[in-house]
Image (cartoon, rainbow, N blue to C red):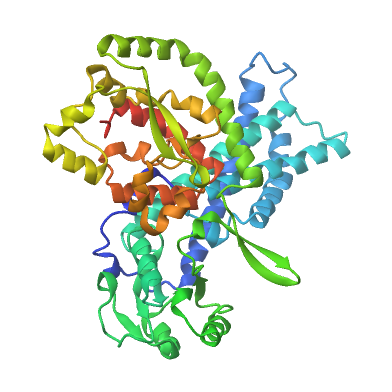
Amino acid sequence: MSIQTILDEMAAPATMSTRVSAPGLSRRIRWLIVISSLMLLDLLMINLAFLAAYFVRFNLNLPFFAHDALPNIWFYESLVLWLVLPTWFGIFLLTGLYQRRNLFGGAREYGLVFRATTLGILPVMIAGFFEPTLVIARGWLILAWFFSLIGVGLGRFWARRVVYRLRERGYLLAPAVIVGANQEGRWLAEQLLKSKTSGLRLVGFIDEKVPAGTLMFYNLPALGPVRQMDRIIARYSIEEVILATSAITSKDRMLDIFKRYANSDEVDLRLSSGLYEIITTGLQVQEVGYVPLVNVNKVRLTGIDSATKRLLDYCLTIPGLILISPLMLLLALLIRLDSPGPVIYRRRVMGLNGRQFDAFKFRTMYLNGDEILDAYPELKEELARTHKLKHDPRVTRVGRFLRKFSLDELPQLFNVLLGQMSLVGPRMISPREMAQYNQWGINLLTVRPGLTGLWQVSGRSDVSYEDRVRLDMYYIRNWTIWLDLQILFQTLPAVLRGRGAY
């Protein structure tokens, strides 16, 4: 998912409830068209990738490849046609690349593409090993894997752009209702309404306590009680039922809903966790004395996910520090020449599991900053409200330059090495800011704060505080290593543009 799409999710939802899906197309027909188009696109990109690999390996005469006689292209094309395409198509099916829950939802889809293309190379390698007459150039095989990964990924990227545009125009939307008009139901509605690309069109709420026709949150109406769900689903052509489990106090009623709709071919039933405040941390089911109990993870990332993220941090941070050390020494000298005081400023911030630490930054303010700000009561009030000032009189001349290009944050690379921060993560905050995260605060402490993140590539300080919170929560809920790589790739252009930097 692109950063612009995430920002679009935060746009005002005033017109969402009036959208309609494309007339005359049932849910099955819509998804049959979408998935069939994806299949054809994937097959096309795979075939083009193997052709590109043949051209690069055998026609460009690159020095690191052996210069053998040019093989017959039809041998490789037959190999692709009769072995690669059927095998890869089956692997793509088995890895879930054509299941609706894995499509158009985020970086997870690209992770599945990586897994499927990597698995797809193995049958070709095995065939060459067991069949001596099947001589396959290893360079061609490696290039084919690389081009396939890039080609299928780009194909999926542009397919997602097309689907998002169609959804923004009211097509490919599934009518949905939320069962439960309590606080959790309201939060669910808020998040879904602000997403232009979720694929859902909220019709209203189903609730026992609210009379039908009553306008509820965001002008969504109450449609009736749970006992009339069949009639409501038929009347409004509902395709998605979202159950706010904390709103259903009767266990028997919840089981009845599950029995009626869990296996329905016409309606998808989605259940919230009922623990909205801790849902992002991850839940595990463990048996204790033959009793299945839900265990709440203390941190968002565990096992291989945590190890992969730390490996990425160290592999980029260590060589990065070596490369930019002359620049950091120069900046330290300029700070000392510009104004008296220490070069490094320590800011007390919240870390993983609530452990506080000092985040290192190049000093960008005068030492008597509080005295300077006392002369500007309106700015002091703005600072207390937003925690940022666009025109801050406390900032030095060198400090303005450092902030514009985020150079003041370079010392935080040492925090990354110390394991206190990560290269990518939520925006670090001070202890007093925790209250502004409300019900989401507990989630923020389940991951390390980041040197960069979604807020950095989305406008930095121009993003409202409420939207910063939403960006952080989106990152925590949807973390993958591919999302980290996407943010890192977009960070440098965002910094060079300097938008929202002050």
In terms of image quadrants, where is residue 147? Answer: top right
Direction from residue 364 to residue 425 in the image, left or right: right
In terms of image quadrants, where is residue 461? Answer: top left
Residue found 82% across the figure and 36% down from its top: 128
Quarter occupied by the C terminus: top left
Residue found 50% across the figure and 25% down from its top: 414
Direction from residue 373 to residue 439 in the image, left or right: right
Is 10 placed above or below 497 here? below
Is 175 placed above or below 319 here? below
Direction from residue 317 to residue 382 in the image, left or right: left
Residue found 41% across the figure and 11% down from its top: 329
**Res 148 seen here:** no
Q: Position of residue 491 (x, y in %)?
A: 40, 32
**Res 76 seen here:** yes
Q: Position of residue 359 (x, y in %)?
A: 43, 31
Q: Nearer the viewer, residue 218 or 133?
A: 218
Is 49 placed above or below 337 here? below
Q: Nearer the viewer, residue 198 or 327?
A: 327
Residue found 36% across the figure and 57% down from its top: 438
- Count the labels in the image: 0
Q: Nearer the viewer, residue 189 or 502?
A: 502
Q: Position of residue 328 (x, y in %)?
A: 41, 14
